[in-house]
Amino acid sequence: MLEACLVTAFDGEDNSSKIICEKLKADCKKIILPNDKKASCEMFKKELDSGFRYVFSLGQKPLIKNKISVEDTAKLNGKILMSNAKSISEIIKKFGYDCYISHNAGTSFCNNLYYFGLDHIAENQIKTDMFFLHVPFAENCNMDAVAEVLDKTINYFILIHD
């Protein structure tokens, strides 16, 4: 049986994704991934293979303020993988927080993890929905408010698929 939910974030003393992940109260497993592409994917693979219904991966994104960037696209070597960003963006907005759908998960750790996760899920036919959410840097948002809306969003997904 699949566990309900996994939340990932990247390590770093001032990394807002880590800080927000640690603030979450939702009933889900949380892991902090190293800032190393290979090591983070190896750690993530073990978690994916153990089985989760939903994966919410968090990363921090410069230039956004008081909103969440919901990624729908991960790219590697000209190959594009997509997820259902619309479903989660609608829920985040329903809970009163601004967000938008982005078509660019970045060029480094975030995109790498997102691509790896979507590819691994598809290749192994794992019944997991993965979402990648970029949160603002700490100075560009109220991290308690972001954690609160993510708690509500995660609990919503858990409840509707219980």
Image (cartoon, grey):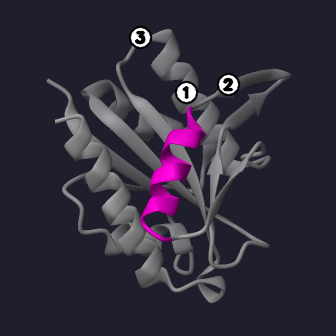
- In the image, is 106 to the left or to the right of 41? right
The residue at 32%/63% (across/down) is 152
Decide if residue 151 is in sight here: yes
Is the residue 92 above or below the residue 67 in the image?
A: above
Q: Is residue 65 left or right of residue 141?
A: right
Q: Residue furthest right?
A: 78
Q: Residue at 58% across / 41% down in the picture? A: 86
> Which x, y percent locates residue 136?
64, 73
What residue span does the magenta drawing correspond to? 84-96
SS at mark 2?
strand
- Which comes sooner in the sequence, label 2 or label 3? 2
Q: What residue is disc 2 on? A: 81
Magenta run includes residue 85: yes
Q: Quadrant of residue 48?
A: top left
Please state, as top left, top right, bottom left or bottom right, where the C terminus lies in the image: top left
Which quadrant is home to the N terminus? top left
Q: CA distance from mark 3 to mark 1?
A: 10 Å
Residue at the disc numbered 3: 125
